[in-house]
Image (cartoon, grey):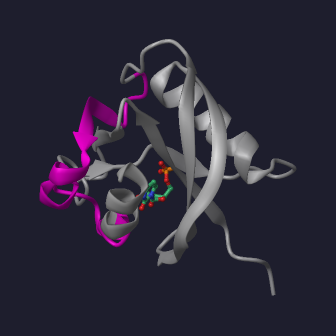
Amino acid sequence: MAAAQVVVATALVHDGRVLAARRTRPPALAGLWELPGGRVEAGESEAEAVVRECREELGTAVVVGERIATDLRIDAGVLRVHTARLADGAPQPRALEHAGLRWVAAGEVAAVDWVGADRAVVADLVALLG
Ligand code: C5P
């Protein structure tokens, strides 16, 4: 049996806040917020995928930290969350799948309209932000 497709999500932390990106698609997810990320490609490590996705989706360089939260089952496979910090440049919504970005403080994390899988890591994000 093939291993489940791994999707990485990035808890990008800067100045005590975490970055959330607003999805434009698919229709079921449009308007909801997620941690930026996507599928790990063949031959790529999870950390490499985080770096690539942040470059593609946010136009920024990041340094990847640790893996947080438990693995989450999603339709596409399994979602794994990695922390990261900015290495260079302010994030901008570069990919068509994102309409906007916002930096979320610990006290605001629970009130964000997250996509389903990401909602499950709210407590981990609050703990991460201290
Ligand atoms: O962004 P992309 O479409 O490559 O993501 C693959 C799948 O992982 C999608 O179904 C997306 O909804 C899901 N995903 C998620 N939470 C994230 C990032 C991606 O549920 N933070």
Of residues 106 and 110, the one drawn nearer to the viewer in this rendering? 106
Q: Is residue 118 magenta?
A: yes
Q: Is residue 32 visible?
A: no
User: What residue do we see at 47% from left, 74% from top?
Assistant: 75
> Which quarter of the figure has residue 5?
bottom right
Decide: is 43 above or below 56.
Answer: below
Q: Residue 74 at x, y = what percent?
A: 47, 74
Does the magenta run of residues contain 47?
no
Q: Nearer the viewer, residue 22 or 89?
A: 89
Instruction: Give how far across and how far down residue 108 sits, in percent.
Output: 16, 50
Q: Residue at x 24, y 41 (%)?
A: 104
Tell whether 116 sits left or right of 82.
Answer: left
Q: Residue at the location (35% across, 53% down)?
A: 130
First to last magenta residue range: 94-121
Q: Quadrant of residue 61?
A: top right
Percent x, y for residue 99?
25, 31
Q: Residue furthest front?
A: 130
For this view, does 31 lie left or right of residue 86?
left
